Image: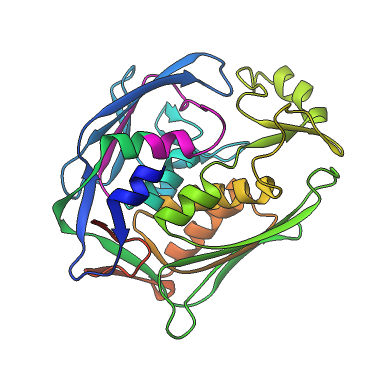
Amino acid sequence: MSSLRERYSLSVTAPAPRRTLKAAISAVGRGLHSGADVTLALKPAETGAGIVFRRTDLGVDIAARFDNVADTRLCTQIAEGEAKIGTVEHLMSALFAAGIDDVLVEVNAPELPVFDGSAAPFLFLIESAGVVEHGGLRERLDILRPVRVEHNGAFAELRPHNEGGAGFDISLSIEFAAAAIGAQAYHFHLSTEGFAGEIAGARTFTQLSEIEALRKAGLARGGSLANAIVVDDAKVMNPEGLRYADEFVRHKLLDVIGDLALAGAPISGRFIGSRTGHALNNQLLRAVFADQANYRLVNGAVEAPLQLTAA
């Protein structure tokens, strides 16, 4: 990730041009739930196209938007009719953090490759393809008043900035019965450099006791210690251990970024969540957009840290 940080710096400009990839890039990886090989391609897109997923085996396009989310069990799945694509949140978090507005994501299966269970491989693909400004003005989603959703003691909330605030702030806490996870909290101000160093490498996780039930349900067929952290109460089963002492909350924060990237524009505001997951994250966006008094879409300047300019 160092070359991305070296080649781009964060700043504020007005107006802020939209960005896409310089070149197409592809990779093959295993689907977490199907266990099948999946081919993924990221391609430059026209100004204003937004982020669009294409099922190349079906010839169907699905816009990466919160209102196209069809399922939130274990991952975030978007759909158009019968065409579905799951586990989009890790790629979406990388695209959001790298400031990509327009890209075509081609995939030949109903889920993205899981790679190592984190967003780092997706950020590497973006870095390798390169980022280019290609005209038009990117939008910014300003949060104007607090919006909160809750379920069984868990909650997710978007708030306006305090006076003088800018960009996207995230505060998240989690709590699991497994002693290896326990209670963890993390605060993060979104930036490309910070995401690469603090968040992107955090892997998805599960508890050993849940794996048998998942596989009986036809899920997690491609799951392994190579693409997920597995815990058994106080024990981390992965021989290499954790990448961060608090890797679990960092991955959940990664998921929040990916899920909220489906807003369709960079968010200017503050997120606060406790024990939230894909379902609540999506419900939060639906609640925001349900009332225009909650938000404002702005064309033009984007506050740091989401602005990428060539260094």
Magenta highlight range: 100-124
Picture quadrant where residue 68 is located: top left
Pick the quarter of the image with the C terminus: bottom left
The residue lying at 56 percent from left, 15 percent from top is 35
The reply to whether the magenta stretch includes residue 104 is yes
Residue 200 locus on image (x, y percent): 51, 44
Residue 14 vs 220, above or below: the answer is below
Left or right: residue 72 versus residue 274 is left
| Colour setup of the view | rainbow
Specify whether residue 197 is in view: yes
Residue 227 vs 76, above or below: the answer is above
Residue 27 vs 129, above or below: the answer is above
The residue lying at 64 percent from left, 40 percent from top is 243
Q: Going by the picture, which residue comes out furthest to the top?
A: 36
Observer-nearest residue: 305 or 31?
305
Most prominent secondary structure in the magenta stretch? loop
The residue lying at 33 percent from left, 39 percent from top is 127
